[in-house]
């Protein structure tokens, strides 16, 4: 329990540091937000009044706390460009991006773990060697390029889906999932390769340890040893990696959304960056950072459950 | 070890990864080097008579939507991509090593504070961190380079700090300390050379990540601006012509893949080096 509390404390500190970094980064930008909101034609009095209303004349620390408390309560400020609350703008897009990331994660787990076990079981077989090279090649393909290739192969040649024909989850959930399958595949591909490679290495390492020999000498067959003993230990580094991969997938979906023309978080983020609509950018960045940090915390906890040895030296 | 040349040859033959990596990297570097002095066409010269042509003898990678020669543009674009990748890794390695060395070697309060900040930065996927920095400083390839460089600092700082923590109490360090070696000399002359293996492999991996990240960010349009384009920007321009002129999309894409693959194979080959 102490371990979990310690990790929880670290997580909160990390969140605070992230929020300070994000806030500072966006407050050192030259340019007056009040001016941005009103346009350059506005009279100095009106600008001054708006500054007062927006609380821009307060000291940095006060502004930070206001912003941070607002963030916790779900009040992300008002978009400079559209003059509407950021929360409403962003939240309706969250399911799209999250569905894609989660689908990519499920694909990664479903494909890579059986493949990793197979390649490790038949180490140095033809299949293993081919897969090792294929993995290297897939890892070298930028996700957006594999996205383009997938659109080309599955969208144009086989016509499994219509490129650019995105259907929102509110109109037709089935079609929505079907359309998102291909972008998810593009996000998952490099992660699948990395996971297969990692699981294979980890399984081979573990199978050379003493406890494996002991398990064999007690009369277990290969599968028994593999699934009951080796796999458990070999999964530990893989779980860390998968945790980081899930976080990466949320961020990676930014590029993939652009490739497949999906109106998710990415589109708002990119237009807000080019329009310098900072409250929106801040909210999205903080949102993604919170997800990433939460996932990392969960990984730490899962870790401890799988392997009770972890974190013992801290106590 | 009697004949290093012969041993090298045998090693290469038994190590297909190294060989493949060396060949691919050499080809890419050759293309970039030649591109500095000579390109078949001017990469920015438009020609309305030859828009969106496929692969031919005149244009070995075809032409783009403005009739520019894709091969010339790829030669130029891969130079930008390579420069950004080198710059990124250089910033990441130098700053990251400095932070990691100081925190790992001295420890204490500063270590705690710096590592919390590094952890917080590490929580950001690097593409997102780079996007934040680009949105603060504006778009352009120099901003992109700085952004990616900063985004790469945390991982190097972590690796180097871990290594310094491991080495800090080793016998040779104690020995040097007893001889009155100063802290600065200890860090750079005694410990740093001992972790060069770890550093070298993370530089190779970082290089690949940098190429991929640069391509991704340029694809989003925050990198080099027209008329010159890096490979990622070329791809995002080319995407809409995928169905009419596949060569325009495939050629820059394949060059990125080869670039990353070459270095990945080199890394794999070096790690298998006996």
Image (cartoon, coloured by chain):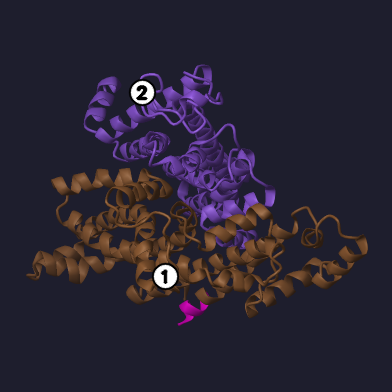
Chain colours: A brown, B purple
A49 or B20: nearer the viewer: A49
* Callout 1: SS: helix
The reply to whether the C-beta atoms of the residues labelled 2 and 1 are less than 8 Å apart is no
The residue tagged 2 is B56
What kind of secondary structure does the magenta stretch mostly adopt? helix
Horizontal and vertical percent position of residue B223 = 58, 42
Residue A51 appears in view = yes
Give the distance between the C-alpha atoms of the residues marked 2 and 1, in whole angstroms. Answer: 53 Å
A61 or A314: nearer the viewer: A61
Residue B203 appears in view = no
Q: Nearer the viewer, mark 2 or mark 1?
A: 2
Q: Residue furthest right?
A: A45
Q: What is the number of the mark on residue A299?
A: 1
Horizontal and vertical percent position of residue A129 = 19, 45
Q: Give the residue displayed 42% in from the left and 75% down from the top.
A: A301
Q: Give the residue displayed 24% in from the left and 60% down from the top.
A: A206
Q: Give the residue displayed 55% in from the left and 69% down from the top.
A: A290
Magenta stretch bounds: A1-6
């Amino acid at each position: 329990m102490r371990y979990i509390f310690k990790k929880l404390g670290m997580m909160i500190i990390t969140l605070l540091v992230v929020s300070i970094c994000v806030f500072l980064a966006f407050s050192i930008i030259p340019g007056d937000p009040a001016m941005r909101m009103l346009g350059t034609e506005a009279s100095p009095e009106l600008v001054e009044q708006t500054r007062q209303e927006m609380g821009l004349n307060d000291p940095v620390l006060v502004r930070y706390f206001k912003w941070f408390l607002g963030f916790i309560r779900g009040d992300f400020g008002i978009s400079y460009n559209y003059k509407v609350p950021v929360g409403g703008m962003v939240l309706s897009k969250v399911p799209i991006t999250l569905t894609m990331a989660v689908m990519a994660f499920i694909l990664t787990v479903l494909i890579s773990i059986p493949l990793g076990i197979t390649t490790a079981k038949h180490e140095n077989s033809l299949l293993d060697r081919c897969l090792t090279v294929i993995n290297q090649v897939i890892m070298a393909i930028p996700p957006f390029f594999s996205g383009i290739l997938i659109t080309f192969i599955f969208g144009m040649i086989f016509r499994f889906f219509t490129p650019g024909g995105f259907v929102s989850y509110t109109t037709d959930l089935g079609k929505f999932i079907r359309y998102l399958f291909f972008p998810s595949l593009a996000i998952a591909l490099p992660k699948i390769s990395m996971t297969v490679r990692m699981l294979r290495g980890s399984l081979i390492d573990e199978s050379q340890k003493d406890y494996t020999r002991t398990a064999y000498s007690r009369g277990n067959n290969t599968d028994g040893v593999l699934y009951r003993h080796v796999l458990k230990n070999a999964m530990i580094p893989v779980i860390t990696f998968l945790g980081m991969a899930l976080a990466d997938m949320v961020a990676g979906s930014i590029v993939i959304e652009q490739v497949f023309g999906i109106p998710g978080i990415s589109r708002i983020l990119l237009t807000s960056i080019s329009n310098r609509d900072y409250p929106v950018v801040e909210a999205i960045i903080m949102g993604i950072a919170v997800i990433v940090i939460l996932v990392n915390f969960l990984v730490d906890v899962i870790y401890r459950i799988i392997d009770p040895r972890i974190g013992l030296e801290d106590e | 070890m009697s004949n290093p040349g012969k041993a090298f040859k045998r090693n290469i033959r038994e190590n297909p990864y190294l060989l493949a990596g060396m060949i691919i990297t050499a080809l890419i570097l050759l293309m970039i080097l030649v591109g500095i002095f000579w390109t078949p066409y001017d990469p920015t010269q438009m020609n309305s008579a030859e828009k969106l042509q496929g692969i031919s003898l005149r244009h070995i990678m075809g032409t783009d939507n403005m009739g520019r020669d894709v091969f010339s543009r790829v030669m130029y674009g891969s130079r930008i991509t390579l420069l950004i990748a080198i710059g990124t890794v250089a910033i990441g390695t130098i700053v990251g090593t400095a932070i990691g060395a100081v925190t790992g070697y001295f420890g204490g309060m500063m270590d705690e504070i710096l590592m919390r900040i590094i952890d917080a930065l590490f929580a950001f996927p690097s593409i997102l961190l780079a996007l934040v920095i680009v949105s603060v400083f504006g778009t352009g390839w120099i901003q992109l380079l700085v952004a990616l460089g900063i985004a790469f600092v945390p991982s190097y700082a972590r690796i180097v700090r871990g290594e310094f923590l491991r080495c800090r109490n080793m016998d040779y360090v104690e020995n040097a300390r007893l001889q009155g070696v100063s802290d600065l000399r200890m860090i750079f002359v005694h410990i740093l050379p001992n972790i060069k293996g770890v550093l070298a492999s993370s530089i190779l991996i970082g290089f690949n990540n940098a190429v991929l990240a640069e391509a991704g960010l340029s694809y989003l349009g925050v990198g080099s601006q027209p008329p010159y384009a890096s490979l990622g920007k070329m791809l995002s321009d080319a995407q809409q012509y995928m169905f009419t002129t596949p060569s325009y999309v495939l050629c820059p894409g394949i060059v990125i893949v080869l670039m990353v693959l070459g270095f990945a194979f080199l890394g794999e080959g070096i790690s298998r080096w006996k």
